[in-house]
Image: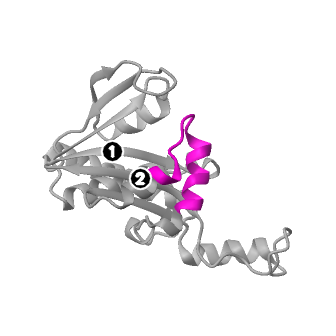
């Protein structure tokens, strides 16, 4: 993620969270050497096809003369590295692209980025009411280890979850299974398999 991504990121942020981060908060995180923020964009070849269909005859209804040059941001993640632990700060997917495997894709990338930086375990806070996010995290091996009372600005509690040790055989097997399930799901959706690395930066 770079400052140039933030207009799109902020639109997703506001649509995803009752108390969204400010643009200034994102800029602050991006300036920290121990913060890792990544965005997922539609693959360029897929964007060319979709945009070509949508914009024919080469004009938005809003009066724009051509389509945007960059594929749109579909989602993003952010975490901080603290010694050998990683604190997941945010995970979000554009509302129009949810339930298509993007959350899994983003977390697979996050786990890999954390492993490359020497992280042994990941932790996060999640709203008590956010059952969908809790199920996703549980699929990645996160388990409940505590609760922060009135953690969020609106008074809602947060559950504290921790991952397995990232280099354990159990964690590696779990991630490999999730990766296989995701690839099968993408193939069923007709999404070309060019690998998650081409999708997230």
Q: Quadrant of the N terminus?
A: bottom left
Report the span colored magenta: 6-25
In the image, what residue occupies the spot 19% across and 59% down? 117
Toward which corner of the image does residue 142 lie, by quadrant?
Answer: top left
Q: Quadrant of the C terminus?
A: bottom left
Are there few (<14), some (14-19), or many (20+) residues within 10 Å of tag 1? many
Instruction: Check residue 162 in the rendering and tell me which mark sits there, or answer none.
Output: none
Distance Cα–Cα, label 2 vs label 1: 8 Å
Q: Position of residue 133 (x, y in %)?
A: 45, 35
Residue 189 visible: no
- Judging from the image, what secondary structure is the residue with disc 2 in? strand
In the image, what residue occupies the spot 59% across and 60% down? 8
Q: Position of residue 137 (x, y in %)?
A: 36, 37
The residue under label 1 is: 88
Q: Position of residue 11 (x, y in %)?
A: 61, 52
Q: Nearer the viewer, residue 186 or 57?
A: 57
Whether residues under marks 2 and 1 lie with C-beta atoms below 8 angstroms apart, the answer is: yes
Q: Is residue 164 left or right of residue 110?
A: left
Are there few (<14), some (14-19), or many (20+) residues within 10 Å of tag 2? many
Residue 134 visible: yes
- Judging from the image, what secondary structure is the residue with disc 1 in? strand
Q: Nearer the viewer, residue 40 or 105?
A: 40
* Mark found first going from the N terminus, 2 or 1: 2
The residue under label 2 is: 77
Q: Is residue 176 above or below residue 198?
A: above
In the image, what residue occupies the spot 65% across and 51% down? 96
Q: Is residue 139 above or below residue 115?
A: above
Q: Position of residue 94 (x, y in %)?
A: 58, 51
Q: Is residue 65 above or below residue 173?
A: below
Q: Is residue 73 above or below residue 100?
A: below
Q: Nearer the viewer, residue 179 or 184?
A: 179
């Amino acid at each position: 993620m770079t400052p140039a991504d933030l207009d799109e990121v902020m639109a997703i942020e506001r649509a995803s969270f009752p108390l969204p981060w400010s643009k200034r908060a994102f800029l602050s995180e991006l300036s920290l050497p121990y913060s890792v923020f990544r965005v997922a964009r539609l693959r360029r070849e897929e964007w060319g096809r979709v945009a070509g269909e949508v914009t024919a005859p080469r004009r938005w209804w809003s009066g724009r003369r051509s389509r945007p040059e960059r594929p749109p941001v579909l989602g993003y993640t952010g975490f901080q590295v603290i010694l050998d632990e990683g604190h997941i700060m945010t995970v979000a997917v554009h509302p129009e692209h949810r339930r298509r495997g993007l959350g899994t894709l983003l977390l697979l990338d996050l786990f890999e980025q954390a492993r490359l930086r020497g992280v042994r375990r990941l932790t996060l806070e999640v709203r008590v009411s956010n059952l969908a996010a809790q199920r996703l995290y549980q699929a990645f091996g996160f388990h409940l280890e505590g609760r922060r009372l009135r953690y969020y600005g609106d008074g809602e509690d947060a559950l504290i979850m921790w991952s397995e040790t990232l280099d354990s055989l159990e964690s590696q097997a779990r991630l490999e299974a999730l990766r296989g399930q995701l690839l099968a799901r993408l193939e069923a959706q007709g999404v070309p398999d060019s690998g998650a690395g081409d999708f997230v930066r």
